[in-house]
């Protein structure tokens, strides 16, 4: 348990919002290698009905069977009378319930882990939007949003591997970027690029930790040595290597015509022009033919 002087502090939450397969697990592992940080993983998955999508990194068990998450659940139940899988974490319900449930969850994680900062890598923009809304209403936690962005070719290649149509994936990719940028307008937030993080993790992590007002620690680069508490996430959390390599497999795996398609469909994003996206979105969107 924390000293009483620390228990009165509001939990600080680094929230990562991004597309899938954009490096959120890598970023959360690097940040949570810090002695004052705990990565909770994709907290939105705590209410997922599929047990296999709620496994923790520390014991590979569902939260109710994990010693750490079991202790968190006991704290949450004492505060709001709910188990973890009953919490309101994304949609539905009223703002007062959403606020109290997330306050209880963050407080419980902070107390059980004895950590000053919690990493929530849920990625969901609707969850972030709602957290920002209740924070503005006086919620007892402080958010530090990070917009993690991966370049179009790597992101589209990952989508292709999952079986997504490239054109549809490109439309969703550009749309989400501008939605995220609009939602974070006027909010103190940090943008992190996957390619920079993977190519030069030390420099990029120095920038991230300075933004969080925490010192960079050498242990953050031996992130396989510590215990991680993440719920769900990329399977790299279960690996054994701490080597970080920039994934540029798209160079060989995308055909020339696919590269040209991605280049054209993501032009509004690369120009940072929402106006151009509004003009071209019906053409970019699959099923709409630009010429009769």
Image (spheres, rainbow, N blue to C red):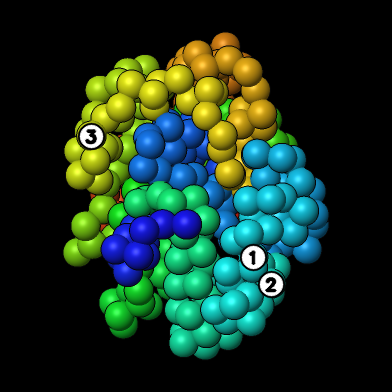
Label 1 packing within 10 angstroms: few (<14), some (14-19), many (20+): many
Q: Is residue 47 visible?
A: yes
What residue does disc 3 label? Answer: 215
The residue nearer to you, when weighing 153 against 145, is: 145
Across and down, in percent, residue 228 comes to 56, 38
Across and down, in percent, residue 211 comes to 21, 43
Relative to 145, say whether 56 is above or below.
above
Relative to 219, say whether 291 is above or below.
below
Across and down, in percent, residue 15 comes to 41, 53
What residue does disc 2 label? Answer: 83
Label 2 packing within 10 angstroms: few (<14), some (14-19), many (20+): some
SS label for mark 2: loop
Q: Is residue 282 visible?
A: no
**Residue at 72%, 50% in the rendered image:** 66
Report, in whole angstroms, how far the alpha carbon at label 3 lies from the one at label 2. Answer: 35 Å
Q: Earlier in the sequence, mark 3 or mark 2?
A: 2
Position of residue 101 in the picture relative to residue 197 (left or right): right
**Residue at 58%, 44% in the rendered image:** 229
The residue nearer to you, when weighing 14 against 150, is: 14
**Residue at 35%, 77% in the rendered image:** 139
Position of residue 83 in the picture relative to residue 80 (left or right): right
Image disc number at residue 56: none
Image disc number at residue 73: 1
SS label for mark 1: helix
Across and down, in percent, residue 99 comes to 45, 79
Q: Earlier in the sequence, mark 1 or mark 2?
A: 1
Relative to 11, say whether 134 is above or below.
below
Q: Check if mark 1's residue and mark 2's residue have beta carbons within 8 Å.
A: yes
């Amino acid at each position: 348990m924390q000293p009483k002087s620390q228990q009165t502090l509001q939990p600080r939450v680094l929230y990562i919002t991004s597309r899938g397969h954009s490096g959120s697990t890598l970023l959360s592992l690097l940040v949570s290698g810090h002695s004052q940080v705990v990565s909770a993983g994709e907290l939105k998955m705590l209410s997922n009905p599929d047990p296999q999508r709620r496994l923790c990194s520390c014991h590979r068990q569902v939260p109710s069977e994990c010693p750490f998450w079991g202790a968190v659940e006991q704290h949450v139940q004492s505060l709001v009378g709910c188990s973890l899988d009953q919490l309101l974490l994304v949609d539905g319900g009223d703002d007062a319930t959403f606020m109290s449930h997330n306050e209880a969850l963050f407080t419980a994680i902070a107390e059980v882990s004895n950590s000053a900062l919690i990493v929530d890598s849920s990625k969901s923009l609707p969850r972030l939007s709602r957290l920002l809304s209740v924070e503005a209403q006086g919620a007892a936690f402080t958010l530090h949003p990070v917009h993690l962005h991966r370049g179009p070719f790597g992101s589209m290649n990952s989508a292709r591997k999952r079986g997504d149509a490239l054109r549809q994936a490109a439309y969703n990719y550009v749309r989400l970027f501008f939605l995220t940028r609009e939602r974070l307008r006027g909010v103190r937030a940090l943008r992190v690029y996957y390619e920079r993080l993977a190519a030069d993790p030390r420099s990029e992590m120095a920038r991230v930790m300075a933004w969080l007002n925490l010192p960079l620690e050498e242990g953050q680069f031996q992130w396989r040595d510590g215990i991680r508490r993440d719920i769900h996430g990329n399977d790299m959390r279960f690996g054994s290597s701490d080597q970080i390599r920039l994934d540029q497999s798209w160079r060989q795996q995308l055909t020339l015509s696919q590269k040209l398609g991605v280049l054209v469909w993501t032009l509004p994003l690369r120009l940072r022009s929402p106006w151009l996206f509004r003009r071209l979105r019906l053409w970019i969107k699959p099923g709409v033919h630009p010429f009769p």
